Image: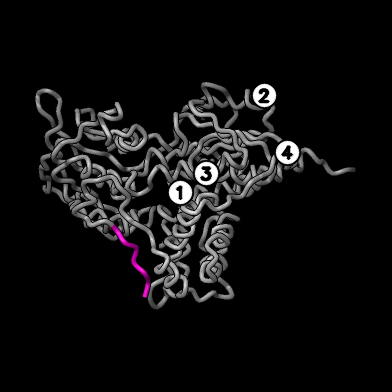
Amino acid sequence: MRQQMPKQDPEIRRRNFDEVAHGFTAEQALAEAKRCLNCKKPLCVQGCPVEIQIPQFITLLLEGKPDAALAKIKEKNSLPAICGRVCPQENQCEKQCILGRKGESVAIGALERYCADWGRANEAVEPTCAPSCAVKGKVAVVGSGPAGLTAAADLALMGYKVTLFESLHATGGVLRYGIPEFRLPKTIVDYEVGNLEKLGVEIQTNVLIGKTITIDELFATGYEAVFIGTGAGLPYFLQIPGENLNGVYSANEFLTRVNLMKAYLFPEHDTPIRIGKRVAVVGAGNVAMDSARTALRLGAETVSIVYRRSREEMPARLEEIENAEEEGVEFRLLTNPVRLEGDENGNLTTMICQKMSLGEPDASGRRRPVPIPGSEEALPVDTVIVAVGQGPNPILLQGTAGLNLNKRGYIEVDPETMMTSIPGVFAGGDIVTGAATVIAAMGAGKKAARAVDQYLTAKNNPAKE
């Protein structure tokens, strides 16, 4: 039987920001590891975007060697404590697990987290690139989210001198500003970033590439290649009347204030945030679940997820949906906001919604929501958080001449080399694909690091004629 990770009681955790899941005990980790069949052709590895040798690390764990198991993970994944917490394993490695065909798959993510947490608690030796390593060249990495952190780590281990540029005052990108403390403690992010510095990666914060310094200037100061991993942080809105009322937030702003600026600790930290008693979150992805669960913890009396499709079409992880339900978040499905109304002072009071039915599948593969005439209803609210996706931040893109973008405004890259239209400039993660998962961005960072190495090796060691 698959082991269940211990969690805080919902009635307690819904009013605190402590981590919800406690992680496996040593006994649970061993019991779960014993379930692995150690397949000769492990499909789970094929399902991992960063190519972790899953049966091998589980075997080492079974042999009582958590240090070696962690080292095996770290051969492919520089952020295991993060991935073990927030990656959608149920749609990737665990989905491919043979045991899952007739029962429950091995809890690969929980075992990865266990190894990473063991290493942190026991001060396990991290991979290093000694000062004597041959320095192949200088590479700039723009953005310290999962794609940038992965690319920086891999390039450092290959022997490059890497500088990581971050526009905010703290590293981590979406890992820090987007994912709440109760799902990913920031001490974990700090620890993983600290391991990058041990590899020799130089980190410069408060540097906005495209404004503070341009990509052309990076090349002029000695960098031989640049990787862009700036993510997708420009929020989308509903484009309905009333979105300028007081009390309407983008999920991006809401979560950034709470997570990065630590508004949940006000007045200890000096960025407050106003949350009403009746909160509606529009959308049903992981960001929507994070926003709804955060609103509860900030003191909202009722929090509703408002989603225009049915439960089956929700893009959020099942675990996050279940956690939200346990904590008391309400779900208003097949419901679509059509306008927001307020009082004479411009404060939000009401969300007017229309009921929907599902028609034929659209381009996303999900059934298209169709309005039901005459089905409008009023929902009393004083806070609305819009979590319907985000696009590419235009600052770097507008400040870089010659950088080709696609119709959606994302950077175009060669799918094989990850190189952009500018020679020596590579890109990956959400800035290329649009908003996706942490592990997908990490996979892109890993692929780009290999491409950078191949490019610079060829450039600096041209074939003799």
Task: Determine whether label 3 and label 2 are within 8 Å by CB.
Answer: no
Q: Which numbered disc flags the more N-terminal residue, 3 or 2?
A: 3
Query: Where does the N terminus fall, quadrant-wise?
Result: bottom left
What residue is drawn where x is 58% and y is 73%? 41
| The disc label shown at residue 221, or none | 2
The amino acid at mark 1 is: Val
Q: Which residue is mark 3?
A: 147
Badge 1 crowding class, 10 Å Cα cut-off, few under 14, some 14 to 19, many 20 or more, is many
For label 1, the SS is helix
Mark 3–mark 2 Cα distance, whole angstroms, equals 24 Å
- Seen from the viewer's position, the closer of residues 61 and 211 is 61
Q: Residue furthest top?
A: 212
> Mark 2: which secondary structure?
loop
Residue corresponding to mark 1:
438
The nearer-to-camera label among 4 and 2 is 4
Q: Toward which corner of the image does residue 153 lie, by quadrant?
A: top right
10 Å crowding of disc 3: few (<14), some (14-19), many (20+): many
Q: In x, y percent, where is residue 189?
A: 45, 43
Let me know if residue 361 appears in the view: no
Mark earlier in primary sequence (4, 2): 4
Residue 239 percent across, percent down from the top left: 27, 35
| Residue extending furthest toward the bottom | 102
Magenta region: 1-7
How was this image coloured? one colour
The span from disc 4 to disc 2 (Cα, nearest Å) is: 17 Å
Q: Which residue is mark 4?
A: 135
